[in-house]
């Protein structure tokens, strides 16, 4: 395959231009070096471009074929196309000036006729990534293995009824984890794309959950064996493509990690669209992960409120993001995680620079939301009322109850005492909602 001609119209990296910038390819809110609550915006947000939607998706849907007609999707030499795709990817990373990228194994390198051939392909592209990263700013936020697209995984990978497919998946994950480690990846993601069931009529739930627990344990063991320092990240999603997935939501994943003694090594990668499919808000899932100590990273996209499937649109909802980032920063923010653009441009957005516009718009929305979240935290706009609401639990009696120094009988005797007549206080929901609107 011959070298590709220049793909993007833009030549220089996107720069900060301020709120009144006239250049459509300029950041209006994302001033990466601006210090907010002791950290640069770039270090708060830790943006990552994903390899799969940005460079692998052809723009097709269940009712129509590809619309993007990417030149690196065409040819007979699969490895040549993969090398061309890497060239385009690193050009986009440069133009967006992002600190990170992410990839699945089969996004980066073509599958071979055997696992050995697939691993060799992945390592060859890993060599190319390594060379490109040596002279580039971008680093690897996380890698992962695609254990859901190939027909062998139609009944799951780790939860498959056939132990040989479990074994094949283990080999695929080992290769992806080792390449991730070689490239300095800060995390490794396990998304159970088909770890679930279509019907309970042919499913042994306990067996499949035990298999999944064993599989993740094996990955943990290998992570330590090769010296990989980052956490493993499980990505909750309740359904699609399966009827029910075992990583349904944050609460379900926490129970799974606790049952199989994995909490020390595994955190969660949370996505807005998946939260909505589970019947939760994005803020709920982030707040719960923080409360349970399993917050790891975020896939930053959004769903369509009128559609019941995973649309993976670029995140643009500033009020929603402001509340998510408020809870995220309050909990300490990212350590090894970041904001991964697991998002697709629409299939009608066929111009190459639409990829740049999509990322720039979403990066600006995230920056604007984070600035609003920081302002709310500085003013204690939400934390103050919450602290006041629970103040009773910080006095001596509240602390004694939580410390186990009061029995049920002790509490009952106090409740029965003459004059004991606690009264409810307003939750002030409407006031707090209007307060948030002052910041966003």
Image (cartoon, rainbow, N blue to C red):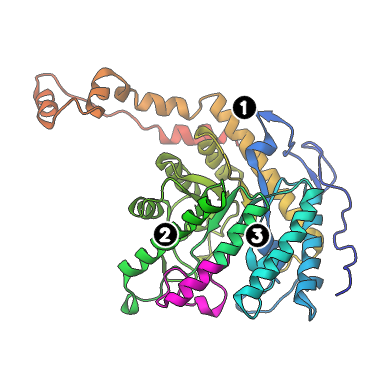
Q: Quadrant of the N terminus?
A: bottom right
Q: Circle 1 — which element?
A: loop
Q: CA distance from mark 1 to mark 2?
A: 34 Å
The percent coordinates of residue 242 (x first, y second) are: 45, 71
Disc ID at residue 168: none
Does 355 sit left or right of 320 as displayed? right
Q: Is residue 163 magenta?
A: yes
**How packed is label 1: few (under 14 Cα within 10 Å), some, or many (20 or more)?**
some
Residue lying at the far front of the rendered structure:
225
For the record, the magenta segment spans 145-171
Q: Is residue 42 magenta?
A: no
The percent coordinates of residue 34 (x first, y second) are: 72, 31
Q: Circle 2 — which element?
A: loop
Total marks placed: 3
The percent coordinates of residue 84 (x first, y second) are: 81, 67
Does 167 sit left or right of 403 as displayed? right
Q: CB of mark 1 within 8 Å of CB of mark 2?
A: no
Task: Indicate whether 153 appears above or below 266.
Answer: below
Q: Circle 3 — which element?
A: strand
Q: Quadrant of the C terminus?
A: top right
Residue for badge 3: 103
Residue for badge 2: 248
Q: CA distance from mark 2 to mark 3?
A: 23 Å
The percent coordinates of residue 65 (x first, y second) are: 68, 79
Mark positioned earlier in the residue sequence (3 or 1): 1
Residue for badge 1: 37
């Amino acid at each position: 395959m011959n070298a590709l001609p220049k793909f993007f119209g833009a030549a220089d990296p996107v720069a900060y231009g301020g709120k009144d910038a006239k250049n459509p390819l300029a950041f209006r809110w994302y001033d990466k070096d601006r210090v907010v609550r002791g950290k640069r915006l770039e270090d708060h947000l830790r943006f990552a471009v994903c390899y799969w939607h940005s460079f692998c998706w052809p723009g097709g849907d269940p009712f129509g074929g590809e619309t993007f007609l990417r030149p690196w999707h065409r040819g007979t030499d699969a490895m040549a196309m993969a090398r061309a795709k890497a060239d385009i990817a690193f050009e986009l990373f440069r133009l967006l000036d992002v600190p990170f990228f992410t990839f699945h194994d089969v996004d980066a390198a073509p599958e071979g006729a055997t696992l050995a051939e697939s691993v060799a392909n992945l390592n060859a592209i890993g060599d190319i990534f390594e060379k490109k990263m040596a002279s580039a700013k971008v680093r690897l936020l996380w890698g992962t293995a695609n254990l859901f697209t190939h027909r062998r995984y139609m009944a799951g990978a780790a939860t498959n009824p056939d132990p040989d497919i479990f074994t094949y998946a283990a080999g695929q994950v080992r290769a992806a984890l080792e390449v991730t480690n070689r490239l300095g990846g800060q995390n490794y993601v396990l998304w159970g794309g088909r770890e679930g069931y279509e019907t309970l009529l042919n499913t042994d739930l306990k067996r499949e959950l035990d298999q999944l627990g064993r599989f993740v344990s094996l990955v943990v063991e290998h992570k330590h064996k090769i010296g990989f320092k980052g956490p493993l990240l499980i990505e909750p999603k309740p359904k699609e493509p399966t009827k029910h997935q075992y990583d349904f939501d944050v609460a379900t994943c926490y129970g799974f990690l606790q049952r199989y003694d994995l909490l020390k090594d595994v955190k969660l990668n949370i996505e807005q669209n998946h939260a909505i499919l589970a019947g939760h808000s994005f803020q709920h899932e982030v707040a719960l992960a923080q409360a349970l100590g399993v917050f790891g990273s975020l896939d930053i996209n959004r769903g369509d409120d009128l559609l019941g499937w995973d649309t993976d649109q670029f995140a643009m909802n500033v009020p929603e993001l402001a509340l998510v980032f408020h809870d995220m920063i309050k909990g300490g923010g990212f350590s090894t995680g970041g904001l991964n653009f697991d998002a697709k441009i629409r299939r009608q957005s066929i111009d190459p620079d639409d990829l740049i516009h999509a990322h720039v718009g979403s990066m600006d929305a995230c920056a604007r939301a984070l600035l609003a979240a920081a302002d709310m935290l500085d003013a204690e706009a939400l934390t103050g009322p919450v602290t006041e609401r629970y103040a009773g639990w910080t006095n001596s009696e509240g602390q004694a109850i939580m410390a186990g120094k009061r029995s049920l009988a002790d509490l009952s005797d106090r409740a029965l005492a003459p004059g004991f007549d606690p009264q409810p206080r307003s939750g002030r929901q409407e006031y707090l909602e209007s307060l948030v609107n002052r910041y966003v």
